[in-house]
Image (cartoon, rainbow, N blue to C red):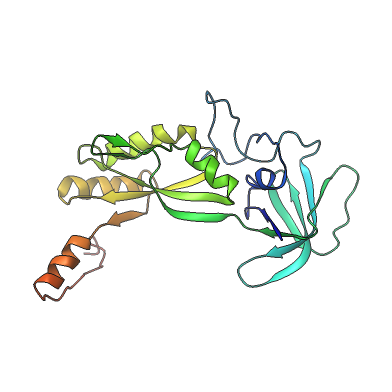
Amino acid sequence: MDTLSLTSSLICVLFLVLLSSTSPSESQSDQFCSAGVGYGEPLCGVSSSLSSPKLLIKGGTVVNAHHQEIADVYVEDGIIVAVKPNIMVGDDVTVIDATGKYVMPGGIDPHTHLAMEFMGTQAIDDFFSGQAAALAGGTTMHIDFVIPVDGSLMAGFEAYQEKSKKACMDYGFHMAITKWDEVVSREMEILVNKKGKHHFNFVVLIIIRLSRLHNLSMVIDCDWPYSG
């Protein structure tokens, strides 16, 4: 059975999977789908080739986290409005026959390294080419690791904001903590309170290996340091 992919809120990937030729149009999410200006692609969202912002995906097997059923999916302006059998619509709605196909939420990849610079090299895929490949395979959102620049989280964040201007799908950031000092501590607080970033990655693999080598027990305190 063919696979038809669709996000829970924006159908960025649907037309890439189902149709042979598409051109994404402007999305309602400027925060994430800010791609393409200057790179030959418009913003992601519902295909501009459609004659109507209203869409009915009819007769597919809708799969979600807890069950699957044969149902229709009704979408307006890129937002899923209803999922139920036998939805009746007017002539102003574009209808796609999904009989014999799965209709499912797009995948989320929580661990990516797009345009990452490392030891004098850079990842071959940037925020456009890597995301385009992900969309073609049914992944509609990813979380990329932000590597500090000269030890600075803020400089790394700003660098990745610039890199992500090529983005064509939803994304988020993991802030990688590669050292610890008071500067990093202050920058974490700024990122949380001023930038809304709440994902931080601490690598403890070396500590785990050394503990195993020397037969030591590890105690990891996960308390919030500013609790008083």
Answer with the quarter of the image where residue 161 lies. top left
Please name the residue shown 68% across and 49% down the image. Answer: 79
Identify whether 199 is placed above or below 37.
below
Q: Residue 91 appears at what percent x and percent y?
A: 91, 44
Please name the residue shown 17% across and 66% down the image. Answer: 209
Please name the residue shown 88% across and 56% down the image. Answer: 88
In the rendered image, the quadrant that contains the C terminus is bottom left
Q: Nearer the viewer, residue 221 or 19?
A: 19
Q: Residue 136 appears at what percent x and percent y?
A: 59, 45
In the rendered image, the quadrant that contains the N terminus is bottom right
**Residue 59 appears in the rendering:** yes
Residue sitting farthest toward the front: 1
Identify whether 72 is placed above or below 54.
below
Please name the residue shown 62% across and 40% down the image. Answer: 28
Residue sitting farthest toward the left: 214
**Residue 32 appears in the rendering:** no
Q: Residue 29 appears at what percent x and percent y?
A: 57, 41
Residue sitting farthest toward the right: 91
Q: Nearer the viewer, residue 228 or 77?
A: 77
